[in-house]
Amino acid sequence: MMDGLSERLATAVEFLKRNGYAKSGRDVARRLGVPDSTVSMAMNGTRKPSWELLLNFCDAYPIDFAWMRTGEGEMIKGERETALLKRIEELERTIEKMKG
């Protein structure tokens, strides 16, 4: 039975696969230096992922540890900051066009 932590890990791995960070859970396991089964079992809820595994996962990929731990906030590190910076750049371009 999957718990919230396993579900979030599975969601994060799917995001990584969709966005080209990893081809599979096996790629994630290799990058983390753990057996394939460690990631697989953590994702499907067979084994609860260790905090060490989750910390290493969040260090290796752009996944926010606070989200991984609690499910609150943004999944991607800096997602809100990136969106704000893009909006500021858009506004600056608009202001420049209005001036010129």
Image: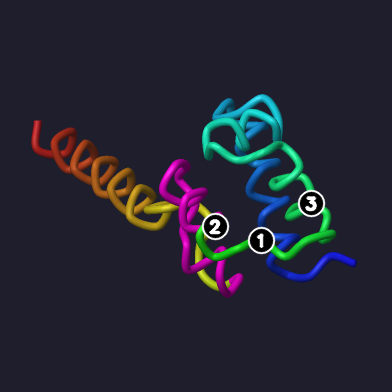
The relative height of residue 32 versus residue 68 in the rendered view (above or below) is above
Residue at horizontal 79%, vertical 51%? Answer: 41
Residue behind mark 3 = 41
Q: Does residue 22 appear left or right of residue 64 in this picture?
A: right
State the SS at label 2. Answer: helix
**16 and 60: which is toward the camera:** 60
- The x, y position of residue 53, in whole percent, is 55, 55
Q: CA distance from mark 3 to mark 2?
A: 13 Å
Q: Are marks 3 and 1 in contact (CB under 8 Å)?
A: no
Tell me the magenta residue range.
53-71
Residue behind mark 1 = 49
Q: Local crowd at mark 3 within 10 Å, few (<14), some, or many (≥20)? A: some
Q: Quadrant of residue 34?
A: top right
Q: Local crowd at mark 2 within 10 Å, few (<14), some, or many (≥20)? A: many
Instruction: Please report whichever mark, 3 or 1, sits nearer to the chain's N-terminal start.
Output: 3
Q: Amino acid at mark 2?
A: Leu
Q: Does residue 97 appear left or right of residue 25 in this picture?
A: left
Instruction: Please report whichever mark, 2 or 1, sits nearer to the chain's N-terminal start.
Output: 1
Q: Amino acid at mark 1?
A: Pro
Q: CA distance from mark 3 to mark 1?
A: 8 Å
Residue at horizontal 84%, vertical 59%? Answer: 46
